Amino acid sequence: MRISRTQAEGIIQVLKETLMQDRYADKALEKVFRVNRELKANDRGIIAEASYDIIRYWRLLQVVSGSQSLWKILGAWLVLTGEKIPAWKETSSINEKSVQATRQQAITTRAIRESIPDWLDELGVNALGEQWEKELHALNQSPKTCLRVNTLKTSREELKTLLTNEGINTYTDEAFPDALLLQENLPVFQTSAFQDGLFEVQDAASQCVAPFLQPKAGQRVIDACAGTGGKTLHVASLMNNKGRLLGMDVAEWRLEELRKRARRAGVHNMETRVIDSVKTIRKLNGTADCLLLDVPCSGLGVLKRNPDAKWKLKPDYINKLITIQQQLLRDYAWMTKPGGILVYSTCSILPAENHDQVAAFMNAHPNAFEIIEEKSLLPSQGFDGFYMARLKRLV
């Protein structure tokens, strides 16, 4: 791959937006593509792949380039990926031997080699011990693109055939019955299959949460932290569109996106409700056969696909999230009816956000709930990191 000037300028703009102006990487990409509509599909692919990889290894690239210049950091990335540095004035001072030599020294320090802040490396070691090294390395791998088949409209076999006919080859993993994995990263949102609501893009680990809730047709199910609804729509498909499904969130704009996705997916048993006060929750106490609390979290389990989070996260913010998780579990759990099921889940790998939260809640309410099962999915297993706990309300 010989990078073009147009591609390089696109990469630089994404880096500037993400790392200098604190925009999320996916939104920065959207903006660059929107402003530069003349970019071809190949250009867009290279810009996206390079931008994410440079963000992923931002700290290492700063060290080996010896510079804060985005152009020199791009040049260092080209050296480390074995690509030829173009003859541009912005990259003319880069010395390939120096970059390689500096890298050899730099990678002896884990936090630099894996490109994370020192505080995050320390947090990971304290939380996970020797396991941290393995998970941290896994979190720096490029994510697989995974689709969740919308079984309200099609089967996995039918969708696989339809996508093949549209030039997108997929494969299955029997551990994830509703999943299709792309053999190579290709744009899927322009396919007829997506426009017809036959699938959503959702990591295989994330696809484990809704089945863990064990929702059944005809039940009343609440997703109290629905967001834009990836898991809500999965729950609807598992309910076969029968029963009552309530998607809730504190932000109306997220629920509006959920409603759009639900229409495309052919979901008919769902309503949405904004959580505008504690009264909204209390009115629903004791009404849910199944309650999903996929709570806000640090996202440390999904750094593969959100590498810019490494540079946006701060220790105080994680502590704030832990407090919010405690409050949500404490206040929302009672929407579960006696005999009903509550699932608490996060896309974090930190025990403080996961098992410790559930243990603290159980200690505070020893006779009200019992733990049925806990499950952890780790990044080193090939997909995102997730935690989930299934609790049964007793009284």
Image (spheres, grey):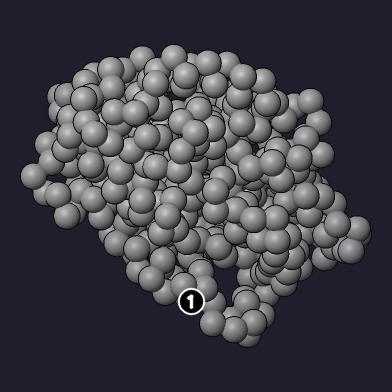
Residue 353 appears at what percent x and percent y?
A: 73, 51
Decide: is 326 above or below 16: below
- Count of marks placed on residues: 1
Decide: is 17 above or below 384: below
Residue at x-position 54% and y-position 32%? 63
Relative depth, front residue between 151 and 331: 331
Residue at x-position 63% and y-position 85%? 279
* Residue under label 1: 274
Farthest residue toward the left? Answer: 38
Indicate the secondary structure of the residue bearing disc 1. strand
Farthest residue toward the front? Answer: 93
Decide: is 195 above or below 375: below
Residue at x-position 17% and y-position 24%? 167
User: Dividing the picture into quarters, in which one does residue 59 lie?
Assistant: top right
Relative depth, front residue between 58 and 330: 58
Q: Is residue 352 left or right of residue 349?
A: right
Q: Residues within 10 Å of mark 1 (few under 14, many from 20)?
A: some
Residue 15 appears at what percent x and percent y?
A: 37, 46
Residue 75 appears at what percent x and percent y?
A: 35, 29
Residue 365 shows up from this direction: yes
Residue 71 appears at what percent x and percent y?
A: 33, 38
Residue 147 shows up from this direction: no
Going by the numbered disc 1, the residue's amino acid type is Val
Relative depth, front residue between 154 and 294: 294
Relative depth, front residue between 298 and 241: 298
The quadrant of the rendering that contains the C terminus is bottom right
Q: Is residue 44 left or right of residue 152?
A: left
Decide: is 46 above or below 316: above
User: Dividing the picture into quarters, in which one does residue 160 lie?
Assistant: top left
Residue at x-position 32% and y-position 47%? 14
The quadrant of the rendering that contains the N terminus is top left
